Structures are given as structure tokens and as C-alpha cells.
Amino acid sequence: METTHIGLAATLSTTYSDPFTVARQFMSIDHISGGRAGWNVVTSPLEGSAANYSRPEHPAHDLRYKMAAEYIEIAKGLWDSWMHRLDHVGEFFSVQGPLNISRSPQGRPVLIQAGSSEAGRGFAATIADAVFTGQATRADAEAFSADVKGRAAAAGRNPGEVLILPGCSPIVGRTPEEAEEKYLEIAGLVEINQALNYMGRFFNDLDFTQYDLDAPFPELGDFGRNGWESSTDSIKKTAREKELSLREMALQVSTGRHEFIGTAEQVADRMQDWFESGACDGFMLSGAVLPQGFNDFVDEVLPLLKERGVFRTEYESDTLRGNLGLPIPENRYTAARNAGAGR
């Protein structure tokens, strides 16, 4: 209500909600905000979620993405459906429609997705306007971006309309040494039991305190793959390849290093390098310590990016989609009518 350009994306699960209600909620917010709404689409990784929604069991990982694909097609159909019945009957949902809300100034809410598993990447390439991801190096980010955009092109989409936004938590110092000291200070704040608890959440709240802290990371087999599949696979792979103990792996997961630690110029250089190399289309920024970490970035790094012409100096649009450089999706009924008229 107090802003005119900032978009707001809410996280909501396709596994434990109904498409018609959710489509109505998000389109309502999109209208109220003048076209600045987004939806971070998740499929709920925690197995315990089922117990809160009268479900006998939590759907398997790939099944959740299959459900989500149908769910999003319904939502997009409803957002186009003003004066048109959808009449969807699918494997998981039956929705008649129409939705009694017209399209918004940006057409429909921006769809965001964050899955990095095989199923998650396929889903993102098919439906996402923007993809949140978490690669620690430019090489890994380049490979991820190329993979998802390649899948998008194979699905008949314009890969330039699928934005890759890796997480970035810059730690800025007046010198490289000061930045490193800040990182070590932050990492030193993490108590080992809290690190174990944090890592355990990726493994469906596995209690890691049952294992020897200084023994090699435990052999867990496929445990945890029905939740955060890509995260648990990465943790097990890293621990195995680097021969890390449980203690070392827990601390690394909770206070992992990345490339955005250094002086303002060094951080700006690396962000520009990632962007211009095609490793990303932007960043999902978070302060390592709030509010100071965010203030350091805004006061010291952002002016450099503006001077170099790689960050805007003013907003281009009043909608979230416009400010992301994304076109307004064509209404399916308008497209069909135009096609029928030979246009």
C-alpha cells in the first residue's frame, strides 16, 4: 500500500491447497497492487505436512511436481478465463471456472520457482518466469542457467523469458581482510547443535545428534530425497568428495562460503562477471546480517553497479513483470480468436 514499484511474491504450496481459491487470491492481490504480485510456487518438501491437511501420506517428490504442473496450468487458465468456462478435468483436479476476476495490468502474477532437482528443473523450465537457485560458484551457476534455459527452449518457450536469479549474500569490507574477518565472525556465531538442527530440516527433521560429530558424515542412502532432493543430494555428495565430518558438513551448510565476500569493488566485479557471462539474469539478494549487511550493499556496492550501467537508476515500469523485463502473456482466448481470424 505504501509503495508504487516494489513487487511482492508470496510462497504457497500446490500440494496442500486448491487451484481455484489460490488463483482468485493471487489475482486479487495483483489487482490491488496494480500488477505487482508474484507467486513463489512450492510443492512442500516436509513429509510431516500431510498430518496437518487430513492426508494419509505425503506425496512422493516427483508426484508432487506432476501435481504442480497440472495445478499451474489450471491457474493460468483461470487467469485468462473471464467470461469463459475452463472445464478442466485432469488427473488430480476438476475445475469448471470461469474465475470472476479479469486479468491484471501485468496480465497475470509472476510465477517463481526454486526447484533444482531433475523434476524441479523440468517444472521451472515449463512454468517459471523467474527461478531462484543457489550455486556457490560461477561455473556451477553457468551450468544451471544453460540447463534450465535449454529445457525452456525445448518446451517451446523463449529462454530469455526465464530469469535465473541465484542467491547472493554479500559480505562487504573496506579491505579483503576485513571482509574475511566479518565472514569468520558471522560463521563463529553458529552453535553446533543449531547447525545440526538446520541441516536436519533438509532431511525431514532428521536428528543428527545421534551420530558422532567428528566421524565421517553418516551414510544415509536415499534418505531425505522425498523432501529437498537437490539439497540433500548436494550435501551428501560434498561430504563424500571432500571427506568431511558431520561437524564440518553441518557448519558448512549453515555458514557456507560463496564468491561475494570482499571489498565493494570486488563484490561488484563478481556480480557483474556472473551477469555478463550468462550465469544469471540478476540476483536474489539477502543480507548476511540484517540490517547492516543489506545497508553495506546498498551504500557501497549498488552505486558501483549503477555507474557501470549494469543496474537501473530508475524503474522502467509500474508492474513487477515490467520491471523484470518480461512481456505480458497473451490471453489464450485472444490468441485463439486472432488465429481463427488469420492474423
Image (cartoon, rainbow, N blue to C red):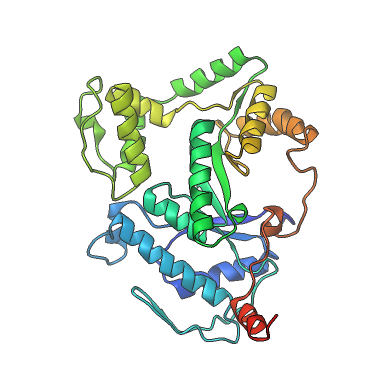
The quarter of the rendered structure image containing the N terminus is bottom right
Residue plotted at (75% across, 30% down):
304
Pick the residue in front: 171 or 130: 130
Side (left or right) of 95 relative to 300: left
Q: Quadrant of residue 321?
A: bottom right
> What percent of the width, then of the height, locates residue 312?
76, 43
Residue plotted at (63% across, 85% down):
340
Q: Quadrant of residue 250?
A: top left
Compared with 59, 300 (above or below) is: above
Q: Residue furthest front?
A: 342
Report the number of discs.
0
Residue plotted at (45% across, 28% down):
256
Residue 16 shows up from this direction: no
Residue 17 shows up from this direction: yes
Pick the residue in front: 48 or 343: 343
The quarter of the rendered structure image containing the C terminus is bottom right
Q: Residue furthest top?
A: 177
Compared with 165, 296 (above or below) is: above
Compared with 235, 181 (above or below) is: above
Residue plotted at (72% across, 55% down):
3
> What percent of the width, then of the height, locates residue 286?
57, 38
Compared with 196, 284 (above or below) is: below
> What percent of the width, then of the height, locates residue 165?
57, 44
> What percent of the width, then of the height, locates residue 117?
38, 48
Side (left or right) of 170 relative to 343: left
Pick the residue in front: 324 or 50: 324
Side (left or right) of 192 relative to 276: left
